[in-house]
Amino acid sequence: MVRKYEGVESRYSTTIEVTFQYQGQRCREPIKLKPTPSNLKKVSNHRAAILHEIAIGTFDYATVFPESKNLHKFADIIKDITIEETLKKWFKVKSPQCHASTVDGYRKIVFNQLIPEFGHISIYDFRAYHMRDWIISRTKMSNKRIRNVVSPMRCALALAVGDEIIDKNPLHLFIYARAETHAQIKAKTKKLDPFNLEEMNLIFESAKGQERNLFRAAFWTGMRTSELCALLWEDIDFINGKINVDKGLTMAADEAEPPKTVAGERFIRMLPQARIALMAQKEHTFLEGNEVFHDSLYGKPWAGDQPIRLRWKAILKKAGLRYRRPYQTRHTYASMMLTSGELLGWFSRQLGHKNINVTTTIYAQWIETEGHDGGSLIDAKFGDAGSTPKVGTEPKKLIKK
């Protein structure tokens, strides 16, 4: 019969568990030894030594059990871990998983906002109210900004839970949203601010050479500025009228990167106005390298989307138009497509959206309904269903084979 020792138990076939009281808490620690009689006795003697050290005040938990899950319970015996260290570790782990533009956004939030505000706090002392009270003090922070700031902190704390540094994430269920004013709600809708045809023509008249070709292509392809920066001549199929979009170049990246989603990699149809712009651009860069659009001031491919924004701003000023982001060229393309009655599914794929729901959520206000007699189309096609057909005629089939 195997002798029993107080505070010592066999666990599985390869582990012995030792139990003892320390600083008012019951501690259990696994020791990787087969629970043989001799090993059980060794662990019992080890436990006796632990109890003696606890009694005389010399017990060092981190030295005896350096990989213990219980270390965080005893802040006085381990090196404190701050929120700054926690955020920096998460940023280091997360960065290789993201596009350069996303990393740049995280960097600004982590190092410019979160660390200056919370970096000095111990990870063991951080609570949800720290985040809540800070947000309340930032009266001009929008709900979107709140979500963007809370997300890295929540993820950093989740990583600490996964690493068994803390037991639970204090921001796991944290939600804070301000009541939005009418002006704030209205401001959201203004983000979609497409140009009309008259404004587009003023832009084309004010832009010259390569800039005119660039912005004409932007208006008539719906491509993002970063995608136009990365466009290569080998991506353009003039014969079949297609453009391959499979990368983008931002200021945060050293080189072009693939889209963030699978749907973002796509072939788009080359509309006549886009063809005009690209054919005109051939005179400037077709023999100069593989990049389609160059910065005419320096004779080199665009380094990213930021320099284009500056050139765009100058052109709008020259045209006498109020400033709108270059991204509004994409919204303009969308509004023209939808008000023209183009098929939503096809158009959604042209934009590189994940599904039609994304497209309708963003552009619902431009889906053509004006002048349409709602219900007339389905009635014309299927209105005879369920009625008694005339003699000598066949009822209409609901499904066309």
Image (tube, rainbow, N blue to C red):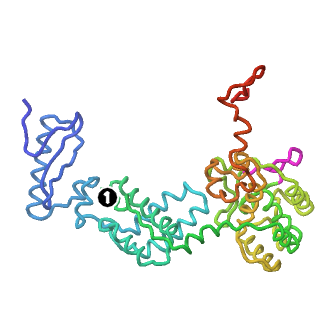
Q: Is residue 70 above or below residue 127?
A: above
State yes or no: residue 244 in magenta: yes
Quarter in which the N terminus is drawn: top left
- Looking at the rendered structure, the number of numbered marks drawn on it comes to 1
| SS type, badge 1 | loop
- Residue at image position (84%, 53%) is 271
- Residue 113, given in percent of the width and then of the height, sits at 47, 74
Nearer to us in this view, 283 or 395: 395
Say which quadrant the C terminus sits in. top right
Q: Reply yes or no: does residue 8 show up in magenta.
A: no
Q: Is residue 229 above or below residue 393?
A: below
Mark 1 is surrounded, within 10 Å at the Cα level, by few (under 14), some (14 to 19) or many (20 or more) other residues, namely many
Q: Residue at x 44, y 62 (%)?
A: 89
Q: Position of residue 30 (x, y in %)?
A: 22, 45
Residue located 75% across and 64% down the image: 329
Question: Would you identify the image quadrant in which residue 35 lies?
Answer: top left
| Quadrant of the rendered image containing residue 391 | top right
Q: Report the residue that reaches farthest toward the right.
A: 283
Whether residue 39 sits left or right of residue 346 in the image: it is left
**In the image, residue 395 above or below residue 106:** above
Q: Is residue 255 left or right of residue 203?
A: left
- What residue is shown at x 67% (from left), y 30% (from top)? 385
Name the foreground residue: 253 vs 268.
268
Q: Amino acid at mark 1?
A: Ile
Residue 118 in percent (x, y) is at 39, 73
Which segment did they paint magenta?
A: 233-245
Report whether residue 300 is seen: yes
> Where on the picture, by quarter, is residue 382?
top right
Q: Position of residue 210 (x, y in %)?
A: 86, 67
Residue that badge 1 annotates:
166
Of 252 and 191, nearer the camera is: 191
